[in-house]
Image (cartoon, rainbow, N blue to C red):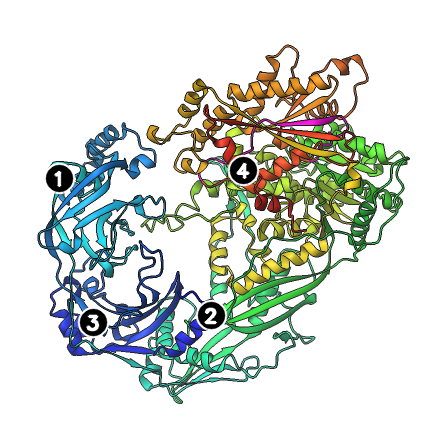
Amino acid sequence: VSSIDHDSGRFQTKLRSALPASLYLDHSGLEEIESMGCIDSKDVSSLANSPFNLHRIKRDRRKWIITYYARRNDVGEATAELRITVGDLKRLDAESHSPANTGALVELTSFLPARSSQPRFGQLSPIAIINFDKESTKESVWTARSPTEKVALTVRGEGNTDSPRITVGLEESIIDDLKATAASSYNAKAYNSACAKGENRRWIYPKNWTVWPQSIFIESDNESILAGQYERAACEQTINMNALWIRQASEGRPVLYLMIKPNVSRTGPDTAIITSSIGYETSFVLAEFPTFWQPCDSLVKAKETVKGVKFHSWKQMENVKCTAQFASVEVEMKKCLEGDDLILINKLTERQCNMMCQRIECDEDVLKLPIHSGQRAQQIIRVFNAVCVSAIQRQMASGGLNFGLVPDKDGWHELHLDDKDTPFGTCEVCVPYRPAENWMYDEGRKRWDRNYESGVSRKFRLSLQNAPTPFEVWVNRQEHSLSIKFCPRVAAHYVGRQIIDGRNIDAKGINVKFHFTDISLQEDPVIDPFKVKTCHNEKPTDITLKEPFSLYERQKKVVTKMVSIENAETHFKELEMVENPVYGSSGLSLTTVAERATKLRGGVIADAIGAGKTIVSIGLILNGLQNARSSRKFPSSTSATLVVVPPALLRQWQLEIERFSPTNLKILVIYDFLALKKLSLQKVLDADVVLVPIDILESKGYFENLVEKAKLSKAYKQKLPKLPSHSGQKEINEARGVWIPASSADPYAGSNNSTNQQNRNISAFFTHVYHEAIRKIRDEKSTTIKKTDTGVPLEFFQWERVIVDEIHESLCTTKSEIEEAKERDGKEFFKERNRRAGREFLGITVKDILKRPLVYRKAIFGLSGTPLLDSTSRVIELANLMGNAYVLGLSSHWRRLEKESSRDIFLENYLEPVRGREVRTAAFRKCQDYLNVACCRNKVADEEMNGSVLETQIRKISMSTEEKELYLSSMKGIPEGKRSLAIRPEDFEDVSPGSFAKFLKQNASLRSRGAELVRICKEVLANDPKTKIIVFTDGSIDAGIAACSFLKAEKDLGCTSLLPTDSNELKNKKISWYQHGDVTDEDKARPRILVLHYEHCAGLNLQTECSNLILFGPLYTGTGGTNSDPVSDASSELQAIGRVYRAGQTKQVVNVYKITVEGPEGEEILDGLVLRRNTDKDTLAMATNAGD
């Protein structure tokens, strides 16, 4: 709280060492509080003999919260709470914006009114408080809440501002809709009930519902403390309903706030309050308005007098005393060997032992406490917390975690296996294997559903419940002691299972170590941008290319790195880490680490755009060509390198290989299933390179052919699945709040809704059939494939190596990308379903590389100029895909949720390991370790650019007045009063994605934008009539269609574009027209302009013929609100520019034109905002991993 930096963990250690185990309130003081007559103080004197036991210490923003509970019979339900807040009690002072009232606040809240025979519903407020103000010289005294008085206030408003209902986009027609809803027969009961409670305004809005006052003046004859002028604050989305009026502090009068306090449990309407705190803490509330009052009432003369305002007052107490009792038990940290005592607690009372052992049917003096699950376990842990935790924490604070163990030099303790021991991770008792699932066709619903054997799920659940745990708690009733025993091998088997599960690897290579930590002392992870190393220290590998070409020195070193990985010379230590907190609130945690030394079988070449990743890959193929040809073997071992690329790059890869290879390589280009049907098995076996689009599974007839070749057509005759059109899970790349409904019918708050689960089931069934067909077709006993057979699925072969170009394209699945795919479904060249097809084809969720669709002998490499290594989840997934490297966190990666059943989602939540600060820090470090050994990023040297210079022109153009009207009118869902040229994507938070897409389409189709595009093209062609121009547009909002219409309207321009109806082969052919010089008259007659979408930009080489590139508009992908991905957008723009500004460019100047539209008077609109976002230095650094 102070301006001096403190170690929060060490402060918590000092705090808990000073805290007593129990607090007691004296009987006379509680009687005095009860005598005040407050409804919440009823029967509070009965708490006099009840200890308030320490329950929790919680770190909050600028403060600490310590909670003590009194419980019925010491172990039952909570009957009262003592909450101690240490630190900043009122957050920020509204005038000085500095910490105010730093100190400690103690609040007593009784739960007895809710436990009575006629329970009181709703929130219970503190009945007594004592405030220790750091700056105050007055002696602190207890004050108790008096019975609430009802007073009348004059509340007058001036000035009009928008109400929150206008802010969220409600329109005038809502009044009629609400009236019709209230009058309907099925709502009559609820509406009449609301009217009886005075809550009819939840159904019917007042006439002036659109406005709230700017200023509120409050007058009162009796309660002058509330009187004054309250001004509305200009805050948004930080206060409930953006409702905050502030009365500034003046001489002798504190700052006050008029706010609307939310009913969090949603049992009633929100209510207006006047409080001395900027939060909603009940202890600071001075007045509470009736539920029917709304701020707009203050603007109506007839409603200025507000009756029934509840005024809260507090009276000083004279007899209230709080006494502390420290734990009388003794704690001993033992020298712990496996199965021995970890912590021994002596001098328990007989009553304390009996409370821990109650309801346990056992006559033995020494017994094990069942503290794993159930109501009985909760009661035992409550007693344990009350009796033991405070003493344990005091011992930890004073003596540390001294267990007498002899750690290694790094502070860890190794676990060793004997010859007879079960390898770590393979014990089915400690970690039961999950039962397999089958599929059954439901004739009634006409769909395939998951099917389990009868009782197998329950059996698995019971085996989990009965599995041993790392800690056991034993009570000795005769010696009045409690011991916590420790079994590290249980934790070792669990963490080891995470690494080996589903990977078909030898568990004997797993090493396990552990240590104990004080959770409060764990450091917060410091997350820096990931860094990718160059290959500067590698030795160059000489590769002979076709004359006169040769590799640059840096490219030879990249080949060396790739060869090292293929030769199994790159070592990596796989790691998983799990935390197991000791039961209760002791703050002690066991951290267990499993490690496995391995050799990488893949990597990522993340060289900068234009650095020559394609030619490096060709060099790798040529380097091992003879070995590959000698590996040919019928029926499935081919000598070919499989190159998986975005569909638009097939022809380009073929031409590049032919251009640089000194020998005539056998290249097969498979555009689609029709092309595959023309190839025999022998041709594929004899090939040197096979080029295939990443979305080959989308090709008509491909999947059906695989199922037929595997002889599974009869098994799935009811309905063969199609590639799923929607994902069952979205990647989370932003922090967003979720309002959890007060309903037991929706415990997942809508996150696990039936639609998502249906999508998961569809995805899972497709994967099931796909991999069953792969298994069948690879089974030598069942296959009858011959050398002359054509159309043999690519999954049948064993490849020399696999190279995946633009690997980042298939990994990105953020919400904005998926929503965008829905908007453009059926229009785009590389849709989200193509990404999903690519992920399925690469086997992204399969841990066993021998069961993945693409099997290789050497290695798999991913190529990407913009790898988007902006999160640990993406690095973890990349490592798994590129060679099956396990990085900490893979076992709980979000991607598994794309296909899981609701049963398994429940089990995952049940088994989800603890991810504390230590684990999160280790995950980041392990991701960096993987990047250090498996990835490289090299930049293009200046001399390689042959002096070529990039010149960027921002072409600003003002829209017309008519265009301004169209621009504003396209903001559907935004109230007219809020529509302006300065509108931001965040303002569309509560607007449907379709409405925001229409707004973007209107912006893209502005005539002024099209006129500037035509003007730039004519300028360029006037200087060089033979040159060719590339225009990049956002196809998801039909910007490409708009650009083409503007260009084709000019007789002397025209353009070429890729149409949705074009085959992959035709699209590649169109692109090739702009990669090479004009030879025939037909070539010279073609339009000089090629219009592409940003989806097409990755990997294209257009530098030999093009030196002028136009960005039709700044790229923004998303559906409004805060769900955009600026890193991805900036990456796409950089990729687009990299199509022409790259090594091999022959022109001295490369011109990039960025068209940006402004308002009629030069006002900044969406274009300017997005342009600044996409060119932000930090965003560009994350898009290119500039930390390399």
Q: Is residue 763 above or below residue 1?
A: above
**For the point 23% across and 55% down, which residue is it?**
250
Q: Quadrant of residue 827?
A: top right
In the image, taking residue 182 as reference, residue 678 lies left or right, namely right
Dot 2 alpha-carbon crowd within 10 angstroms: few under 14, some 14 to 19, many 20 or more: some
Quickly name the residue at label 1: 303
- Tag 4: amino acid: Arg
Mark 3 = which residue? Answer: 142
| Residue 688 position within the rendered picture, expressed as x and y whole percent measured from the top left | 83, 38
Whole-angstrom CA distance, mark 2 to mark 4, is 40 Å
Position of the N terminus by quadrant: bottom left
Q: State which region is magenta.
A: 1099-1121
Residues 1023 and 353: in front is: 1023
Where residue 158 appears, x then y in whole percent?
20, 38
Which residue lies under the disc numbered 2?
9
Could you tell which of marks 1 and 3 lies nearer the N-terminus? 3
The image shows residue 1050, relative to residue 767, as above or below, that is above
Cβ atoms at labels 3 and 2 below 8 Å apart: no
- The kind of residue on which mark 1 rests is Lys
Q: Which element is circle 2 on?
A: helix
Percent position (x, y) of residue 832? 57, 35
